[in-house]
Amino acid sequence: MSNEISLKETERKVFKAAFQDGLVDIGIGGFLLVFAIGPFVTPYLGDFWATIVIFLPLWVIVFPALGLIRKYVVTPRVGVVKYGQWRVSRMRRFNVIILIVLVFSLILGILSAVEFDAVPGWIHAARFSLVFLLAFSIAAYFLDFTRLYVYGAVVALAPLIGEVLYQYLNVPHHGFAVTFGLPAVLIIITGVVRFIRFMRDHPLEQGT
């Protein structure tokens, strides 16, 4: 029994180390940056085309580029780990729960669209915040990725603070450029710093 616990703890530490290269942070920052830029594009293209134009570079360029960096730069330095059944089962549960959260967020999104002019703006913001808090917290727990708790708390406050800025200071676009843009930039910088540190601490072996 003690050997099984020790093995799980070792596997947990190895799994956590996979998030120390900063690439996930950069991806999260890029995703959040979309919410800061989006409101400026929507008036010209409409909701549908604005969504396509904004998210397309993220899925076609940014995320694939991060994947290639992980494959060709990170993996040769740390190797490949095959995880046990406990971790595989945990990730399956994570995927199911995240799917439920995504369906829940879709329902809230439809509800907000239907009630857009019928309820106060802070209710829409609170729904948006709830989705972010749930998604980040669940991911932090199942992935043993502690920084996500902090990111989740900061990002969950973004829509609410943005609504305050919009209502009381007339900041345009519900303050998203500020409340999402600033965390996005800080998270990207955190990721870049971590990646540079990772490259310094994990030099490529000669002949590799």
Image: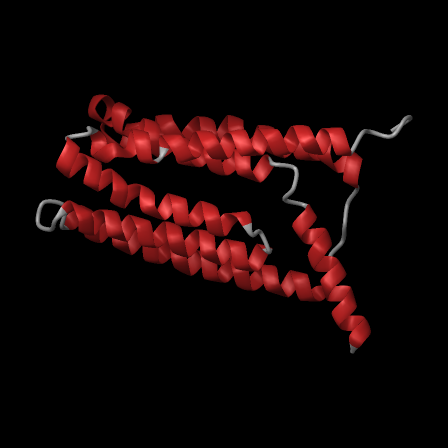
Of all residues shown, which one is farthest toward the bottom? 1
Q: Residue 189, relative to residue 152: is it above or below?
A: above
Front residue of this view, candidates 24 and 116: 24
> Residue 73: x and y, percent?
72, 30
- Total marks in image: 0
- Colour mode? secondary structure
Front residue of this view, candidates 137 and 43: 137
Can residue 140 be seen?
Answer: yes
Q: Residue 139, relative to residue 205: is it above or below?
A: below
Of all residues shown, which one is farthest toward the front? 169
Image quadrant for the N terminus? bottom right
Of all residues shown, which one is farthest toward the left? 118
Residue name at image x 66 percent, y 61 percent: 88
> Residue 152: x and y, percent?
43, 49
> Residue 181: x and y, percent?
37, 30
> Residue 142: x and y, percent?
56, 59
Residue name at image x 37 percent, y 28 percent: 54
> Which quadrant of the figure has residue 56?
top left
Image side of residue 123 versus residue 146, left or right: left
Of all residues shown, which one is farthest toward the right? 207
Can residue 72 be seen?
Answer: no
Residue name at image x 60 percent, y 63 percent: 90
Q: Residue 157, relative to residue 72: is it above or below?
A: below
Q: Residue 207, relative to residue 11: is it above or below?
A: above
Residue name at image x 52 percent, y 35 percent: 27
> Which quadrant of the figure has residue 166?
top left
Image quadrant for the C terminus? top right
Image side of residue 47 versus residue 59, left or right: left
